[in-house]
Image: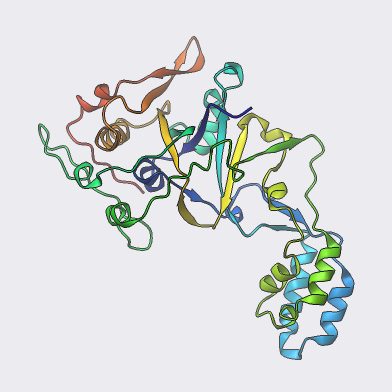
Amino acid sequence: MQPDEFIKFRRADEKSIQILTTGECYYSSPENFNDPLDCAHSLEGFPQKILIDLESKLRKEKLGILHGLGSAISEKLRRIDYGVVSFCGRHEAMENQDPILCPNLWGHYAENHKGICIGFSPKNTYDTFDYSDALKPQSVENGRQFPVPTQPGGSNLLQHITTRPHIHENLLSSTNDRIIQVKYSDQFKLPTPNWDKVIENYENDETIINASSSSEMLSKLLNDSLDVKEVVSNKHKNWKNENEYRLFGNKNLSQMIGAEISSVTFGLNTPDNVVRYITSIIARFYGINSISLYKMTLISGGLSRVPFEINDAMLSSSQSSVTFQ
């Protein structure tokens, strides 16, 4: 059953602002994930005859590459060389299993409840806007501003928004095979490459012997020997409360996912100036009441999500600027 909404818990940082202003999500490298088994596959059973044959064929100056290859194999696991963006799937009919009511997801992914949760629609596509009007600093009452955060590498978010072409294919749609539902298993086991395919690659690809690094050599050997979707979707049942869905693509890049932003939810401890800043962005880019806004709160000792009026933040705001670390 397809989720009614895909949600993403985030720190209130530059990448969050980029999501809200461009509809792009950042594809993180699995190397930065806190679980070493996430997006990993096993290297146990690697054909030793390949290592023996390489030792006889590699020139002396390339034995360091062979040593690096052996070291990588001895670690028994390897992460895929793709970027991954993760979402939690929400089903309106499953309130008691709603991930947005899960305190540890807010604590873990949204900076101890100080961040936000952005919702995406699997049915509606993202619309581009006339950014020239939305981004003009506005003088309201005693000086509301709209400073534009800078992006890593010296590029400016304003320049990025106004020059980057936007693709409207909704990658979260049920008709798109790039959205992958995570499968949780009681007996967790890392996927294993097809070793026959690895041997075939070694025998048929003459460029392997000329690889400039052990990483390049291993990638060539493993080419087409794994089902990347199987690796990306494989997690232990202890993560099940996330009800996770994933997209994979080029790592360490922000890329358009084509899904309409359907909601923004503020955490229990989201600072007032961040709330004002983000509601200012939403008002200018999308208009009042175009995106559903919510605030997490405690009711009868339990975590609840209640509607939040954009005017509650905007009217009390003397300045909508904020500095991100």
Give the residue at x 71% y 89%: 61
- Quarter-wise, where is residue 181 in the image? top right
Indicate the position of residue 35 as horizontal and vertical percent values: 65, 47
Answer with left or right where residue 51 lies relative to residue 135: right
Indicate the position of residue 49 as horizontal and vertical percent values: 89, 74
Colour setup of the view: rainbow
Above or below 196: residue 37: above
Visible residue check, residue 37: no
Indicate the position of residue 232 as horizontal and vertical percent values: 67, 47
Please identify the residue farthest to the top as the structure is shown. Answer: 300
Above or below 309: residue 115: below
Indicate the position of residue 152 as horizontal and vertical percent values: 38, 59
Answer with left or right where residue 140 lies relative to residue 253: left
Give the residue at x 87% y 61%: 45
Please identify the residue farthest to the front as the structure is shown. Answer: 175
Please identify the residue farthest to the bottom as the structure is shown. Answer: 60
Instruction: Out of 222 and 269, give the one closest to the viewer.
Output: 222
Instruction: Out of 13 and 249, give the one closest to the viewer.
Output: 249
Answer with left or right where residue 297 lies relative to residue 280: right
